[in-house]
Image: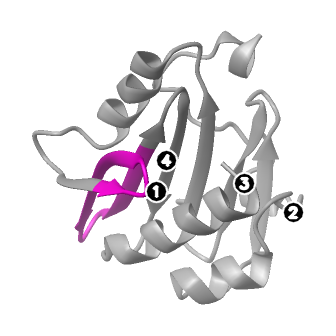
């Protein structure tokens, strides 16, 4: 069963929130802190996703970064995940190395969401620059050999 049949718009749930300290199995904690530009004070995973979703916190209540890797039943379902996270009407298109999707950055945060076949990778950052979300997404893709 792919991603426990979670809906397209599923976000990770970390019951203990930022007081949790469960490391992401595919991203180095200090690398994420350096890349996103904030100290790491908490992190957790949501194992309902086939590849556990990772959430990283700094001092604010909202996560500094959220990484979601979706394994969907079809390519269209993966496209739907990207369209939910980074709607084509409000984001800049991304098309690189067979991965396509969208990116956006503003004072409320940034998103970088791409898909290739039935796999989607979505990164939300509390930073304004979508480059930070992009770098985290590319490191995820590289480390997981997607």
State whether residue 104 appears in this view: yes
Graded by Cα atoms within 10 Å as few (under 14), some (14 to 19) or many (20 or more), the crowding at tag 4 reads many
In the depicted structure, whether residue 6 falls above or below residue 13: above
Question: Which one is closest to the eye, mark 3 or mark 1?
Answer: 3
Residues at badges 3 and 1 in contact (C-beta under 8 Å)?
no
Crowd band around label 2 with a 10 angstrom C-alpha radius: few (<14), some (14–19), many (20+): some
Q: To which residue does mark 1 refer?
A: 124
Could you say where residue 104 lies in the image, as x and y percent from the top left?
25, 60
The relative height of residue 129 versus residue 11 in the rendered view (above or below) is below
Kindly identify which residue carries mark 4: 122
Q: Earlier in the sequence, mark 4 or mark 2?
A: 2
From the image, tell me which residue sits under label 3.
Answer: 145
Q: Position of residue 53 (x, y in %)?
A: 70, 44
SS category of the residue bearing label 1: strand
Apparent side of residue 146 relative to residue 117 in the rendered image (left or right): right
Q: Residue at x 75, y 67 (%)?
A: 27
């Amino acid at each position: 069963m792919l991603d426990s049949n979670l809906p397209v718009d599923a976000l990770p749930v970390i019951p203990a929130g930022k007081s949790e300290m469960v490391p992401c199995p595919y991203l180095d904690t200090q690398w994420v802190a350096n890349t996103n530009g904030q100290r790491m004070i908490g992190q957790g995973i949501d194992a309902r996703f086939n590849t556990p979703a990772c959430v990283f916190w700094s001092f604010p209540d909202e996560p500094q970064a959220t990484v979601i890797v979706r394994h969907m039943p079809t390519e269209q379902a993966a496209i739907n995940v990207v369209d939910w996270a980074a709607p084509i009407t409000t984001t800049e298109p991304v098309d690189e190395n067979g991965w396509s999707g969208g990116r956006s950055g503003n004072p409320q945060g940034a998103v970088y969401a791409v898909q290739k076949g039935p796999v989607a990778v979505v990164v939300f950052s509390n930073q304004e620059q979508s480059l930070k979300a992009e770098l985290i997404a590319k490191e995820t893709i590289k480390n997981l050999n997607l």
